[in-house]
Amino acid sequence: MPGHRKLGRPTDQRKAMLKGLVTSLLQHGRIETTEARAKEVREFAEKLITIAVRECDNFTSKNVIVSVPVLDSKGRKMLKTVTSKNGNKYEVVEREKKEVLKTVDAPSRLAARRLVMNWVYRVKDEKGKSISLTNKLFDEIAPKYKDKKGGYTRIYKLAPRRGDGAEMVVLELV
């Protein structure tokens, strides 16, 4: 008996379909699909959430000096005129150095984040702005399930699909 369902597709198509479904599940919190697909997606999603829960608090904070642009009262960047060695004049953004508190991942958390990035696609919101599902998983979803040992998803059965009669289900995060 194989370790997973083949879903009637070649390996590359099957992996792409499962990655897309896992991405949608993490982005929206619920998806509607067939029962066989939902059972496969549930395995991958629960493994990713387990990895994120395990590495949820594995980071440190550190003060870092960063260079940021100086802004005027309207929020625009301030420019200053600079002369180069050969006498050309050009404008550059005026910058100042600030000390900022940044979070630094431990090596095992970084490895976990990279593993998750292999299983989710890059997505954009309605406005076209890029969303990091890896950050969402580690910062929002994982802390919610910190005290839970598993069973992060739930499957509800729906009516059979018109046309081919496939069993339809809703897969959602609990």
Image: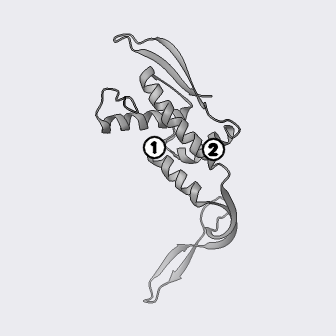
Q: Position of residue 34 (x, y in %)?
A: 43, 21
**SS at mark 1 in the image:** helix
Tell me the amino acid under the disc marked 1: Trp
Please report the residue visible at 58 percent of the width from the left and 48 percent of the height from the top. 135
Residue 96 position (above or below residue 102): below
Q: Quadrant of residue 164?
A: top left
Q: Position of residue 90 (x, y in %)?
A: 48, 77
The residue lying furthest to the front in this view is 1
Q: Closest to the observer: 42 or 3?
A: 3
Please report the residue visible at 50 percent of the width from the left and 13 percent of the height from the top. 158
Please report the residue visible at 30 percent of the width from the left and 30 percent of the height from the top. 9
**SS at mark 2 in the image:** helix
Please tell me which of labels 1 and 2 falls first in the chain.
2
Tell me the amino acid under the disc marked 2: Val
Q: Position of residue 140 (x, y in %)?
A: 64, 42
For the residues marked 1 and 2, what is the alpha-carbon distance in whole angstroms? 16 Å
Residue 155 position (above or below residue 2): above
Disc 2: CA contacts within 10 A as few (<14), some (14-19) or many (>=20): many
Q: Which residue was labeled with disc 1? A: 119
144 vs 171, left or right, is right
Q: Closest to the observer: 67 or 163?
A: 163
Q: Quadrant of residue 5?
A: top left
- Does the residue at mark 1 contact the one at mark 2 (Cβ under 8 Å)? no
Q: Position of residue 106 (x, y in %)?
A: 61, 60
Whether residue 73 is visible to the viewer of this picture, yes or no, is no
Which quadrant of the figure contains the C terminus?
A: top right
Which quadrant of the figure contains the N terminus?
A: top left
Q: Quadrant of residue 74?
A: bottom right
Q: Closest to the observer: 63 or 84?
A: 63
Q: Which of the labelled discs sits on residue 53, or is there none?
A: 2
Disc 1: CA contacts within 10 A as few (<14), some (14-19) or many (>=20): some
Which marked residue is nearer to the observer: mark 1 or mark 2? 2
